[in-house]
Each structure stands twice: as structure tokens, then as C-alpha cells.
Image (cartoon, rainbow, N blue to C red):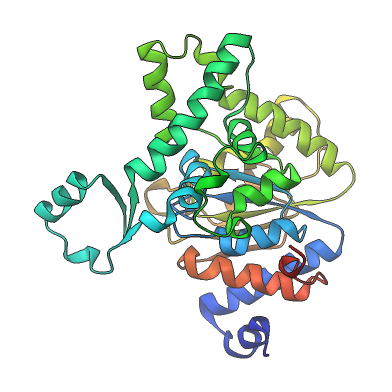
Amino acid sequence: MPRISDFIEHNYRHFNAAALVDAARAYVTHLEDGGKMLVAMAGAMSTAEIGVSLAEMIRADRVHAISCTGANLEEDLFNLVAHDHYVRIPNYRDLTRHDEQALLERHLNRVTDTCIPEEEAVRRVEGAILQLWQEADRQGERFLPHEYLYRLIRENTLAASYQIDPADSWLVAAAERNLPIVVPGWEDSTLGNVFAAHCISGDVSDPRVVKSGIEYMIQLADWYEQTAADTPIGFFQIGGGIAGDFPICVVPMLRQDLEQSDTPLWAYFCQISDSTTSFGSYSGAVPNEKITWEKLAVDTPSFIIESDASIVAPLIFQYVLEHAGTSSMRAAR
């Protein structure tokens, strides 16, 4: 059976297609030179079911840390427990305001062409995670947002509700490998709102049971220092916003604010985005701008692919899996 990477190599020759090939080849080279890779995810990639390809990358040791929005963190779990209740709307561009109201009345939360079911997804997870928040509250314990979700997975709390193969969940793969995760701005998520509501109502007495974004940066700094001491670290960014802006700043923080000038810069950079540089958009800034912020070096392999990440990212992941010397682990599960 022909490999996807062979198709890409033969057909993708110019423009964004060529940039995809260049970025994928450099990703493979980075890994083969002993490098590690942090993947940053913005947008609604979990609802786009990026887990089908990203989980395999995690299991194959091709992704070594993740930074993601709170939405991407929770929506992979939502999909895991409520997939059969999701509703796809191919003609979403034609919806009227009354159509949208009708979706609301069905308790369906729309993300482009896909509706997340409120009861089966959000409320099902809420019931389970509230117990963990309250337990931590009673015992005076504190954990990072993703650590609560890791616990739900490791303790099989929701396993009876799984509606997809767990092998297609990137969060399950990450929990199995105890992958470092950074979730900046977690408060800006559905579960973040749910947590705030339970604090307001008194169900949880101390909001500090969920650790903060500053504590995420401290943890990331420790991981970066320890890892970069042995191997170069690359940065693969899907979309823009805080999921990418937050973790990439760990390097200038270490070098400038902590005056650890021997901290290595990021050794690879790729961003899949359709943002532009106009109006001061940081998400759309070309990699060269990051040199001035002491994030990338003059000779850092750097790429921008101006395209749809839901199309591009799985292709790059498959290319890397086929070229980086590791066979698929799915058959062993």
C-alpha cells in the first residue's frame, strides 16, 4: 500500500504545499538528531478530532510536550464520552438566527460544522470532575487543570461512557505517557466557567485547588531547562493565540528575566496558521520577528504554512510517522 508521505513528496511541490513538505522533513531531521518537540494547539482541533493522528504521534514518541487551550484539553474528553451524540451540520453557512436558536433549544453548542451536546458531554464530565475538585478542597490539595483530567482517565472514572476507541484520544495517550501539558488561560474554557460557578455557589470553597497559569510557566521552565540540557527542543504550533504565545516565551524568560543566558533557543519552529501580520498580529508574525524576542536563532529551521490546520497537521504527522523510523504502535494495542 502506497505511503501518504510518498504521495506528498510527489505531488506537493510549490507554495503552501512545498512549505508543508519542508516543515515535515525538518521535523524528521530534528527528531533523528535527538531533538524533542513541543506541540502548541489553538483553535478547535480537539473537536476536529486531531486525536486520531496526534495520539499516534504521542505513542510513537514524536511529541514530547503539549501546550493547548482549555477548550482543546476538555473537548478531547468531551468527544471521548459523547461522540455518538455530536451533530454535524455540513450546511452551517446557511443557518439563520432562528436555526441557531433551535440548536440552542436542543442543547447543542455549535463549533463551525459540529455541535457539542451539552448534557452528554459537558454535564457528564462536570459530574465526575466536581468530585475531584471537592476532594482536593476537603484535603487542602492543589493540582493543575490537566492533572484532574489525567486522574479521570487513569482511574477509568468515565470509561463506561467512552464512545470512541480510546486509541483515538490524544488526552488518553498523553495520560498514559504522563506527557507534560501546559494549559495557559484555562479559565477561558467551559470547565473553567463550570469551576468558577461551583466556587461562587460554594460547592468548592477555595478556588486555589486549581493551580494557576503562572504555576504552569514555572513547571514549563523546569521542564525546558532539564530537557534542553540534553537535547534541542522544537516548537510546532497549530494556530495562534495564547496556546503558542505563552509557552514560546519560556526561553526569553529564562535567558533575560532569570539571566540564564546559556539557555538554548528553540531549535525548530513551524506554525500552521492563516493569520496575517497586519494590524500587529502576533499570531501571524513571521518567524524572523521571534529572533528579536530571543526565541529563535538566525539559523533555526523555521516554517509557516498558511492553510487549514485540520488538513495540514494530520498530513505532517503521518509524514513524520512514516519517515522517523518508528512503526505504528496501534497494532500492539
Q: In the figure, 217 relative to 101: above or below? A: above
Residue 301 locus on image (x, y percent): 71, 62
Residue at coordinates 79% horizontally, 62% vertically from top-left? 30
| In the image: residue 132, left or right of residue 227 | left
Farthest residue toward the left? 98
Residue 41 locus on image (x, y percent): 54, 50
Nearer to me, 210 or 80 = 80
Residue at coordinates 67% horizontally, 81% vertically from top-left? 5
Residue 322 locus on image (x, y percent): 73, 76
Q: In the figure, 199 relative to 95: above or below? A: above
Q: Quadrant of residue 261?
A: top right
> How many numbered marks have been drawn onto this rendered protein structure?
0
Q: In which quarter of the image is residue 33?
A: bottom right
Q: In which quarter of the image is the C terminus?
A: bottom right
Nearer to me, 42 or 300 = 42
Farthest residue toward the right? 230
Q: In the figure, 194 relative to 80: above or below? A: above
Q: Quadrant of the N terminus?
A: bottom right
Q: In which quarter of the image is residue 120?
A: top left
Residue 324 locus on image (x, y percent): 79, 70
Residue at coordinates 73% horizontally, 41% vertically from top-left? 178
Asked if residue 321 can be seen in this view, the reply is yes
| In the image: residue 227, left or right of residue 315 | right
Asked if residue 244 can be seen in this view, the reply is no
